[in-house]
Image (tube, rainbow, N blue to C red):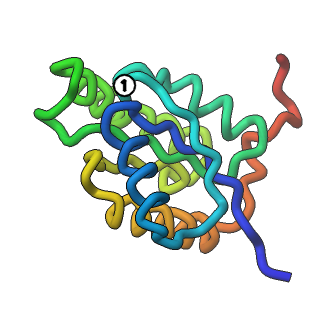
Amino acid sequence: MSFEPNIVAFLCKWCSSAGADLAGVSRLEYKPNVIPIQVKCSGRVNPLYILKALKEGADGVLVSGCHPGDCHYVKGNMYARRRFAILRKLLEYIGIEPERFQVSWISASEGTKFAQVIDEVTESIRALGPQKKLTKVGFDE
C-alpha cells in the first residue's frame, strides 16, 4: 500500500481560496490529500499554526495567498514571506525537512494553477514519506 500524505493548506480568503473554488466549479481534478483552512490573509498565518499542524500529524503544510504586491491587506503577504523564510530555517534546525512546508501565490483567477500546485505539493510530500519527527510524542500540550 502506498503512502498517502495528509496536508494542511492555509488559503487566503481573497485569492487562493477563490482559486480553489474556481478549480472546483471548473471541475478540475487534483489530489484529495489537502485539508483547506481559509484565513483572511496569508500574513495572518502564525508560524506556530504550521508547527501545530505538523505536531498534530500533518505530513506537510501549504500556505497560499495573493501574489506579492496584490495583497488585499497591502503588505500581508510580504510580512508572511519574511516569517516563512525564518520558519524554514527553524524547521531545518529541529530536524524537519523544510520541503514539508511550502508557499505558493495563487490568484482568484488561477484555478488551473491551484490544481497543479496541490498535485505538486502532494507528490513532493509523498516522496518525503510520513512526518514523524514532530508528532505528539515527546511534546507537552
Residue at 50% from the left image edge and 37% from the top image edge = 10
In the displayed image of the protein, which residue is found farthest to the bottom?
Answer: 1
Residue at 51% from the left image edge and 45% from the top image edge = 92
Residue at 18% from the left image edge and 21% from the top image edge = 75
Q: Quadrant of residue 51?
A: top right
Residue at 73% from the left image edge and 36% from the top image edge = 55
Would you say 99 lies left or right of 75 here?
right
Q: Quadrant of residue 69?
A: top left
The percent coordinates of residue 82 (x first, y second) are 28, 29
The percent coordinates of residue 2 (x first, y second) are 79, 80
* Residue nearer the viewer, 84 or 76: 76
How dense is the environment of label 1, judged by Cα within 10 Å: few (below 14), some, or many (20 and up)? many
What is the number of callouts on the image? 1
* Residue nearer the viewer, 140 or 18: 18
Tell me the residue that label 1 is attached to. Answer: 41
> Of helix, strand and loop, which one carries label 1?
loop
Quadrant placement of the C terminus: top right
Vertical placement of residue 53 versus 46, above or below: below
